[in-house]
Image (tube, grey):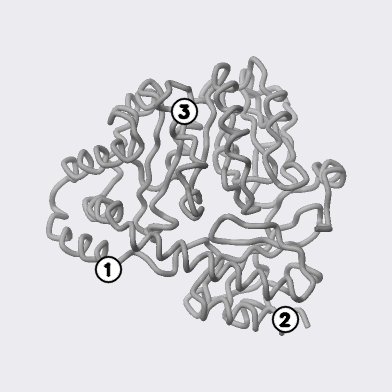
Amino acid sequence: MNHTFNRRTWIKSSLMAMGSMALAPAFASAKNKSMAVYQPESILNEHIPAFNFDEARLVAKLNANENPYGPSPKVIKAISDSISLGNRYGHGEARELLTMIAEKEGVSPDHIMLSPGSSDILEKVAFVQFMNGGNVVSADPSYMSLMNTAQKLGATWKPTLLTKDFQHDLDAMEAAVDSETNLVYICNPNNPTGSITDATKLRAFCSKVSEKTPVFIDEAYLEFLDNPEKSSMVGLVAEGKDVIIARTFSKIHGMAGLRIGYMVAQPERIESITSKVRSTMGLCVTSLNGAIASLKEESFLSSCRDMNTACREYTKGEIAAMGYDIIPSHTSFMIFPLRMEGQPFMKGMYDSGVGIRVFNIDNKPWCRVSMGTKEEMEIFVDAFKKVTA
C-alpha cells in the first residue's frame, strides 16, 4: 500500500504547530518552572470546525467512537431498576463489580481500581507519576490524554514515530527510556490510527521495560478484536510485572455516557492512587449496576463485535474502491487521507448530517470515521461521494 506519508516526512513535520488534541505547555520544567524546557509537538493535530453546527441534527453521528448498539436491553433494565437506589452510595455494587472484574482478569481484587471511564485513569496515573516531573515515552501519533496531563504538570514527552506498518516502534521506545522516564504509554489498538502492535513483541517489550519503569497499556479498543484475550497484556500483571492496564465500558459495552472503566495493576500502583483519592466515590449506583449486567452480556458484546466488523469491512471496501488508502483498522473507527482541504470537507459532511473528525498528519488532512449502524455507514458513503466529487 502506498500511503501518502512516511517516517521521513513525519520527522520533517514534527515541528509543525499542533492543534487541540496535542496541546501542551511550551515552557515547563520538572524541577524549576522558571527554566525554559523544549517540549516536542505532536505530528498530529485536529481540525476544529470553523463553522457552527447542531450535533443534535446529525443523522449519522460518527465522530466519537461510540457504540451505536448499546447499552444492551438487559443493561438498560439494570440501570432503570437501580434508579430507586439513587439515594444510596454504591459501595456494595462497587465491591461486586470489582470482584467480577478481578475474576475475569485472573488477579486478586487488590489489583483492580474502578473509575468513571478510562480517561479518569489516564489522568490520575499522570498526576501520581509526574507530580515531580520526569518524562513519558509514547508513540506519535497516539491518544494524547495522558501525555497532555503529564506535560501540564511539568513533565517532558519523548515521542517515537510509528513503524511503516503503523505499529509501535518498540525498539525506539525502549531506547528512549532513561533514568528520568516515569512511564511508558502504549495505546493498543492505537487511536487514531486503528492499528495494532504484535502481541508477542509487545509482551516481550513490557516484560523487559517494566523492570525499569511502569508500562501503561491502554486497551480501550481491545474487545473489538476477534480474540481479545490473546492480545491483552493483563496476564503480565498476574506475573508480577509493573504493567498498568486500562479498560473501559465506553466502547464495545456501549456505556460511553455512563462513565465507568477500570485499571489492572500491581497493588502498590493501585494504592498510590487510592491513598490520595477515593476512586469509587466518583461512581454512581446506576452505572455500577449497568456494568455488572454488561459483564454478563457475552452474546450482546459478540453481536456488537460482529456488526462493527461488518460495517468496517463495508466502509473500507466502498472508500478503497474510490482509490483511497485506509490504514487497516482493528477498532470501531478507521482513518484515511483526503484529497481536499479539511475544513470544506468537514463542513460538507456536517451539512449532509454526518459527523466525522478531521486530523492533519504530515500537514495533510485525514478523515477519521467511527463505525455506526449499516444504515449510518451507507449515509456516510453517500455523503462522502457527494462532498468529494
Q: Residues within 10 Å of mark 1 (few under 14, many from 20)?
A: some
As rendered, which of 126 and 137 lies closer to the eye?
137
Q: Which residue is drawn at 74% across and 47% down?
A: 165
Answer left or right for 208 relative to 341: left
Quadrant (top left/top right/bottom left/bottom right) for the N terminus: bottom right
Quadrant (top left/top right/bottom left/bottom right) for the C terminus: bottom right
Q: Where is residue 38 in the image (x, y as percent from the top left)?
A: 75, 30
231 vs 134: above or below: below
Amino acid type indicated by mark 3: Leu
In primary-sequence order, the first of circles 2 and 3 is 3
As rendered, which of 297 and 142 lies closer to the eye?
297
Spatial CA span between label 1 and label 2: 37 Å
Amino acid type indicated by mark 1: Pro
User: On residue 73, which mark appears?
Assistant: 1
In primary-sequence order, the first of circles 1 and 3 is 1
Residue position for label 2: 387
Residue contact between numbered discs 1 and 2, judged by CB atoms under 8 Å = no
Residue position for label 3: 236
In primary-sequence order, the first of circles 1 and 2 is 1
Q: Where is residue 324 in the image (x, y as percent from the top left)?
A: 77, 68
Q: Residues within 10 Å of mark 3 (few under 14, many from 20)?
A: many
Q: Position of residue 91 (x, y in %)?
A: 18, 40
Of the residues tagged 1 and 3, which is closer to the observer? 3
Residue contact between numbered discs 2 and 3, judged by CB atoms under 8 Å = no
Q: Residue at x 43, y 42 (%)?
A: 120
